[in-house]
Amino acid sequence: VESFNLPLYVIKDATKVIKFTPDIANPRNDEHKDLVERFEMGVAESYDKTPLKSGFVTAEVNDIEEPSTRNASWIHGILYNFTSHFVRGSVGEPSTVFTDLIEYISKKNNYEVGTSKLFISSDQANPFSSCYSSDCHANAICTPVGKGYS
């Protein structure tokens, strides 16, 4: 199995804007459990509609964090940190694990993660971009340039 750690910025639960709270981050909390279960199911449903479907095994949420700690403009919503597992050798280009998922959710599923009623923002942080782990100020605009950023 090959595993990839990914972030996904979710802003709505059905029509309701999601607001991060410490309770949502608590794995013992019932709302947390519900959000995790629906998200994991939705990610599986989404990968099933991508070219990676035959290699996808499972997705598991590692934690839910406050999105503004990653990007100051992300004032609403929650940031899922999750791991997607694939059959070894089934992923040709690692970045497609993220881009195929985002492409399906945003362009073919109206921003909904599967049928979970969880909706992502159009503004996502690509973990395969040189800007992802940059040390830029949270209010800065990072631009990938080759293997670096400005």
Image: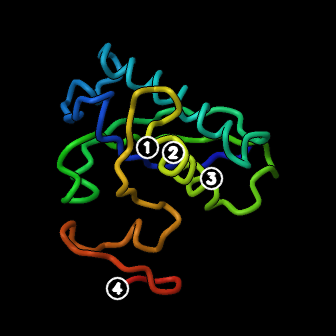
Q: As shown in the figure, which amino acid type bears the numbered disc 1?
A: Tyr
Which mark, residue 111? 1
Characterize the local packing of mark 4: few (<14), some (14-19) or many (20 or more) Cα atoms within 10 angstroms: few
Disc 4 is placed on an element classified as loop
Q: Mark 4 and mark 2: span between their CA atoms? A: 29 Å
Q: Earlier in the sequence, mark 2 or mark 3?
A: 3
Q: Earlier in the sequence, mark 1 or mark 2?
A: 2
* Rendering coords of residue 143 (x, y %): 37, 80
| Residue 21 found in image quarter | top left
Q: Mark 2 and mark 3: span between their CA atoms? A: 13 Å
Q: As shown in the figure, which amino acid type bears the numbered disc 2?
A: Ile
Q: Are marks 4 and 2 in contact (CB under 8 Å)?
A: no
Disc 1 is placed on an element classified as loop
Q: Are marks 1 and 2 in contact (CB under 8 Å)?
A: yes
Q: Give the residue furthest to the right.
A: 89
User: 39 or 82, which lies in front?
Assistant: 39
- What residue lies at 80% left-to-right and 50% top-to-bottom? 90
Closer to viewer: mark 4 or mark 1: 1
* Rendering coords of residue 85 (x, y %): 66, 40
Closer to viewer: mark 2 or mark 3: 2
- For residue 10, side relative to residue 50 (left or right): left
Q: As shown in the figure, which amino acid type bears the numbered disc 4?
A: Ser
- Please say if 136 is above or below 93: below
Q: As shown in the figure, which amino acid type bears the numbered disc 3?
A: Val
Which mark, residue 134? none
User: 112 or 3, which lies in front?
Assistant: 112
Per the image, the residue denoted by label 4 is 150
Per the image, the residue denoted by label 3 is 97
* Rendering coords of residue 102 (x, y %): 52, 51
Per the image, the residue denoted by label 2 is 105
